[in-house]
């Protein structure tokens, strides 16, 4: 997705009503495309308590659906407009994408409503001259819904064909075909276009039944986790608006993400460093494992993210977590070494494309090399502050080897005193936490590195390696 610079449109009242959900979706998509914002962040700020639950659900569906299917939507729209959507005003292209997504994917939405409200959105953005174009294109689309396969040229490559059909950049599809093969790549692409499970972490296993009963009374459906004993999934309502969430009884967190801090094997009394801690989802598990006599330091380079973490920790009742602003690629300011360190490194996020679909349009191949260099620097810095005999977990939510096994290999070449924990030992670290029927060996490769893959597991794609300093 090429970012198009656009000032905020001079909105005017429309003579016809536009649903709150579509107004919100339009504004979120505008900010994502024009300002480089992240959809999840903007949705969180827009969907406050004053927004009805059904409007919040529809706005979220439209925003994430348009972002997931953007390439396919643009392909279909350009068949009719006879020009690249990039040549249209941003407000017009967003209205077209929103309308076509609703027509093709949301069966409960009458096509007439999708068309009419897209036209009104264009008028509201003071682009009335394009209203007839939006109306004509979307009406034709509603009257003649064609299978996409029949519109593809005969001579395109497999990666190009899959990229259009499953709405991913061709260069990413080419990489995955080379590593995973066609069947696993298609499963991965399909998983990236499905709404992810709303997975949650149970903080007090002794309160399981009471918590689940409370959530069901609030109208939510509760399902068991697929990987971890203390994970569960919610659907049918807003988990963040429940009393139990506000009271810190559970957190919303993908299951693979929940597994990462468990790999560290933190003991009571340990000194623990969470080096790239924001947004703070993994820190609470470290705090609970270290206990009253342990110390967990949460560090991040961005002050605003640390402030958001502090608010999260207040909700969870975690009052003894020092928050430190620092650049972890430079020498660390701590006097004492740590027994355990988590480096959940900034990465491309290609394992989270279902949750953050805009990433697929922003990422460029050359960025992987830059990320690799920073990730190696982060691990090297963290190892310098690790006690002999201490352990470090390096993790990403990326599927790319440049950010995963190649980082670990480079670190090991440069640090002979560091070893990667072997597969048998690594699997034992996670086995006690797994749900019934899940084999630990299915989550680790032959080198003892933790891996999950959307399409294989019902979670995000994560990588982790356990390193020990001798």
Image (cartoon, rainbow, N blue to C red):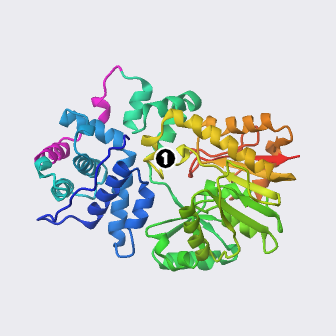
Between 323 and 230, the one lying in front of the other is 323
Residue 398 in percent (x, y) is at 58, 44
**Quarter containing the N terminus:** top left
Residue denoted by label 1: 353
- Residue occupying the point 56% across, 50% down: 460
Taking the magenta stretch, the answer to whether it contains residue 39 is: no
- Which corner quadrant of the image does residue 408 belong to? top right
Residue 431 in percent (x, y) is at 76, 55
In this view, 463 is above or below 401: below
- Residue occupying the point 78% across, 72% down: 291
- Residue occupying the point 64% across, 74% down: 208
Residue 336 in percent (x, y) is at 83, 60
**Where does the magenta region start and end?**
132-155
Left or right of 336? Residue 220 is left
- Magenta stretch, overall SS: helix
- Which corner quadrant of the image does residue 420 belong to? top right
In this view, 272 is above or below 384: below
Residue 225 in percent (x, y) is at 60, 61
In this view, 401 is above or below 202: above
């Amino acid at each position: 997705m090429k970012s198009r610079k656009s000032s905020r449109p001079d909105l005017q009242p429309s003579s016809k009503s536009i649903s709150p959900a579509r107004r919100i979706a339009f504004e979120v998509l505008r900010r994502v495309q024009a300002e480089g914002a992240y959809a999840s962040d903007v949705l969180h700020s827009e969907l406050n308590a004053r927004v009805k639950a059904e409007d919040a659900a529809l706005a979220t569906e439209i925003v994430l659906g348009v972002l997931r299917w953007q390439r396919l939507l643009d392909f279909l729209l350009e068949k009719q407009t006879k020009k690249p959507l990039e040549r249209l005003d941003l407000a017009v292209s967003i209205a077209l994408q929103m309308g076509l997504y609703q027509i093709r994917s949301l069966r409960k939405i009458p096509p007439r409503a999708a068309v009419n409200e897209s036209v009104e959105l264009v008028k509201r953005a003071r682009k009335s001259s394009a209203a007839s174009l939006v109306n004509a294109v979307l009406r034709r689309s509603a009257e003649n819904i064609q299978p996409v396969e029949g519109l593809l040229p005969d001579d395109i490559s497999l990666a190009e064909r899959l990229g259009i059909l499953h709405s991913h950049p061709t260069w990413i599809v080419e990489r995955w075909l080379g590593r995973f093969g066609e069947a696993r790549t298609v499963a991965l692409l399909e998983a990236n276009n499905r709404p992810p499970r709303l997975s949650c972490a149970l903080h007090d296993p002794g309160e399981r039944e009471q918590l689940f009963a409370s959530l069901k009374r609030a109208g939510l459906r509760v399902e068991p986790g697929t990987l971890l004993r203390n994970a569960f999934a919610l659907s049918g309502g807003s988990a963040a608006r429940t009393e139990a969430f506000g009271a810190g009884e559970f957190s919303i967190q993908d299951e693979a993400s929940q597994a990462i801090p468990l790999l560290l094997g933190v003991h009571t009394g340990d000194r623990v460093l969470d080096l790239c801690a924001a947004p703070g989802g993994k820190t609470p598990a470290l705090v609970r494992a270290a206990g009253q006599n342990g110390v967990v330091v949460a560090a991040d380079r961005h002050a605003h993210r640390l402030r958001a973490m502090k608010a999260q920790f207040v909700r969870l009742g975690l009052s003894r977590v020092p928050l430190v602003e620092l650049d972890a690629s430079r020498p660390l300011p701590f006097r004492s070494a740590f027994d355990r360190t988590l480096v959940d490194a900034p990465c491309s996020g290609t394992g989270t494309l279902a949750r953050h679909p805009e990433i697929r349009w922003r990422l460029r191949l050359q960025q992987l090399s830059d990320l690799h260099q920073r990730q190696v620097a982060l691990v090297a810095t963290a190892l310098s502050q690790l006690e002999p005999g201490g352990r470090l977990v390096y993790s990403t939510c990326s599927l790319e080897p440049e950010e995963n096994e190649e980082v670990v290999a480079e670190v090991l070449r440069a640090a002979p005193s560091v070893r990667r924990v072997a597969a048998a030992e690594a699997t034992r670290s996670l086995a006690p936490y797994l749900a019934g029927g899940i084999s630990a060996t299915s989550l680790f490769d032959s080198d003892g590195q933790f891996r999950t893959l959307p399409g294989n597991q019902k979670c995000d794609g994560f990588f982790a390696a356990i390193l020990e300093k001798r």
